[in-house]
Amino acid sequence: MESAVCSGCGCLCDDLDVTVSRGRILEVANVCRWGVSRFLGTAKFQAGRDRRRLTAPQVRRQGRWREAPYPAALEEAARLLGKARRPVIYGLTSLGSRAQEAALRLARRGRARLEPADLAFQAPYYEALRRQELFFAPLEVLRDEADTVLFWGANPLHSAPRHVVRHSVFARGRHTERGVEDRRVAAVDICATETAKFCHLFLEVDPAEELALIQGVAAALGGGAPPGPRVRGTRRLADFLAKAAYGVIFCGRGVSYHSNGRVTAALAALAAVLNSRFPFSLFLLSGDFNARGLYHLLLRELGRAGAPDFHEGAGKGAATLTPLDWREADAVLVAGADLLWRLQDEDAQDLQRRQVPLVVLAPFANRTTAAARVLLPVALAGVEAEEVAYRLDGLPLALKKLVDSPLPTDEQVLTDLGQFL
């Protein structure tokens, strides 16, 4: 099967060749380790190690797992969520768009809060885009036109391994025929990463000075004085960006650590200053394959890229940019994410101490499935089920079904669960 779309990360590479025989995937070409993990079920950082595939619904009773028929597992899940005072639906960034729509319907029906897995990373970005009136650009345009690339708090070799090859650094485009030789690449991070090795300029910045560095660069480009003491490297980065004809900033999860969205807002303001002189875009690099699709859904349905809360006292679905206080949650449905891996240790320990029931939809075993009260295995979107996903530049792509699976899809489970609530 040629030109299959990979759901390994937000790049959604569409040039994979997949060899299938007797209902099994034997080989995948043009794929990174993230894609291998998705198609062949291996660990991302240990390619020779298989991930444990979940095959049957299970319910935990008196501390022990027991296999249960699908309807019985659904009924138990609905009972746990239905009796909760503050139910939460968490994750969704690694689900297809149809499943995300089903989750939003379920949140409305169950009067739950829908908490995206990366709210602190994504929501400030969309707010900043709206305030600064920045524009999207297709990745193909960036490949063809962008001669200046800046990675900020991002290591694409970990979050989206083929990004630098297909779209940003080494890709050969219409006006960048020699790839990296026709581009200038820079990175700013709190420590040197693999990305720094192929950058023409790398700045290691103290997290406490990150905001001042961005504001200083913006002031230098605008011809003004920096608002505070100048951070080392400000002039070099300003000179680097001033020479661009077409540029792009790719932000990683580093911009969301301990900044409360201020770094993202400052980078958007910097992109606006640059965009007044020449085309300049700002993008997030997300490792989750359909984070962009989730926020498109929230913007379309609710008008704001936040966490909608359908609890009776929460404003009838009003979306908030403030992450959830996990001390409020008394039942959690997890789908398309590994909750206990993402949470801070104190929040994860608090959930376990209070014995908050977890209902988990997942294709593979992870930290959260090990602590679930009800476990519902699902088919893999883009491998065992058809779906739709949005690439990190907002382009919707159809994910094909390559092999059959006896397991239900995420969309089916979420829809069926809604019938019990």
Image (tube, grey):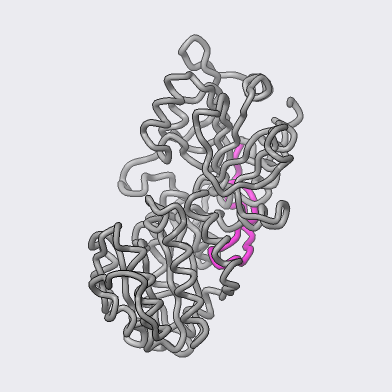
| Quadrant housing residue 304 | bottom right
Is residue 349 in view from this perspective? yes
Q: Report the residue at 68% width, 37% height from top.
A: 314
Q: Main secondary structure of the magenta part?
A: loop
| Quadrant housing residue 103 | top right
Q: Report the residue at 67% width, 54% height from top.
A: 297
Left or right, 34 with reference to 93: left
Query: Which of the two residues, 105 or 275, is positioned nearer the viewer here?
Result: 275
Residue 317, placed above or below residue 390: above
Over which residues does the magenta segment extend?
384-406
Residue 202 percent across, percent down from the top left: 26, 72
| Residue 399 falls inside the magenta stretch | yes
Left or right, 321 with reference to 105: left
| Residue 222 falls inside the magenta stretch | no
Q: Report the residue at 49% width, 84% height from top.
A: 144
Q: Quadrant of the N terminus?
A: bottom right
Residue 419 percent across, percent down from the top left: 76, 29
Q: Report the residue at 51% width, 81% height from top.
A: 275
Is residue 73 in view from this perspective? no
